[in-house]
Image (cartoon, rainbow, N blue to C red):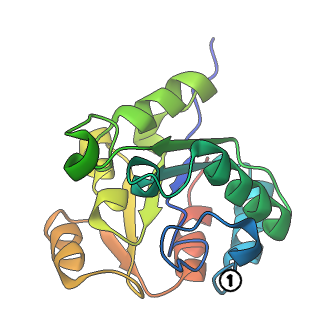
């Protein structure tokens, strides 16, 4: 009998895992938010694949390139003391590049990650500080959690209306996830 695909934890990066000074592109400016290092390590030890999924409109705006996104992620991994299973990003912004299908809350990046990494989207968690980070859970059958410290009121309302969870800090998110099987 074939083994069932495992779930993953899909994580936004800016204002979810690291402080966002605005269009973060310099690895020297990467600062982990409270509880992130320990929380990521706990999830990794428990067998959860960790996948970054991020909208990066700074690329569309010409402020930095994909290599800067990769360099910031590398620094994030160094500070967290682990490697992510994958990192996916949308380099577009409707005002600069027109509409696209990969910008969150679109599902393209999540489906690409699932195909690349053999993940079960319905068993996965979708975590971030914007509605677009958590709302894909509604369409994909997983668990969405909005971190509220940097969330806009309209995002809290949308996530709550969709029946998804909110959390005041990253440790609350990790505790909820660790109660599940990857």
The image shows residue 182, relative to residue 117, as above or below, that is below
Write down the quadrant of residue 143 in the picture.
Answer: bottom left
Q: Position of residue 34 (x, y in %)?
A: 66, 87
Q: Position of residue 148 (x, y in %)?
A: 38, 83
Who's the residue at 55% across and 54% down the image? 64
Could you classify mark 1 by the number of other residues whose Cα lies within 10 Å: few (under 14), some (14-19), or many (20 or more)?
some
Who's the residue at 52% across and 22% down the image? 115
Q: Position of residue 77 (x, y in %)?
A: 78, 59
- Residue 125 relative to residue 107: left or right: right
- Residue 154 relative to residue 170: left or right: left
The image shows residue 154, relative to residue 46, as above or below, that is below
Who's the residue at 34% across and 37% down the image? 102
Q: How many marks?
A: 1
Residue, disc 1: 35
Q: Nearer the viewer, residue 116 or 26?
A: 26
Q: Position of residue 120 (x, y in %)?
A: 49, 33
Q: Nearer the viewer, residue 43 or 147?
A: 147
Residue at the top extreme, as displayed: 1
The image shows residue 156, relative to residue 119, as above or below, that is below
The quadrant of the image that shows the N terminus is: top right
- Residue 51 relative to residue 39: left or right: left
Q: Secondary structure at mark 1?
A: loop
The image shows residue 102, relative to residue 176, as above or below, that is above
Write down the quadrant of residue 36 in the picture.
Answer: bottom right
């Amino acid at each position: 009998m074939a083994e069932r695909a495992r779930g993953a934890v899909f994580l936004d990066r800016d204002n979810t895992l690291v402080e966002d000074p605005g269009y973060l592109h310099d690895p020297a400016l990467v600062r982990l938010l409270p509880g992130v290092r320990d929380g990521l390590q706990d999830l990794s030890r428990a067998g959860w694949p960790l996948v970054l999924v991020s909208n990066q409109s700074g690329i569309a705006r010409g402020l930095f390139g994909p290599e800067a996104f990769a360099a910031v992620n590398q620094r994030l991994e160094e500070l967290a003391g682990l490697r992510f299973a994958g990192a996916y990003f949308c380099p577009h912004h409707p005002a600069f590049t027109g509409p696209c299908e990969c910008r969150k809350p679109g599902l393209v990046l999540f489906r690409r990650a699932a195909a690349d990494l053999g993940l079960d989207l319905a068993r996965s968690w979708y975590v971030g500080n914007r509605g677009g980070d958590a709302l894909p859970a509604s369409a994909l059958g997983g668990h969405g959690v909005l971190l509220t410290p940097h969330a806009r009121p309209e995002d809290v309302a949308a996530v709550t209306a969709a029946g998804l969870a909110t959390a005041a800090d990253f440790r609350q998110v990790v505790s909820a996830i660790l109660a599940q099987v990857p």
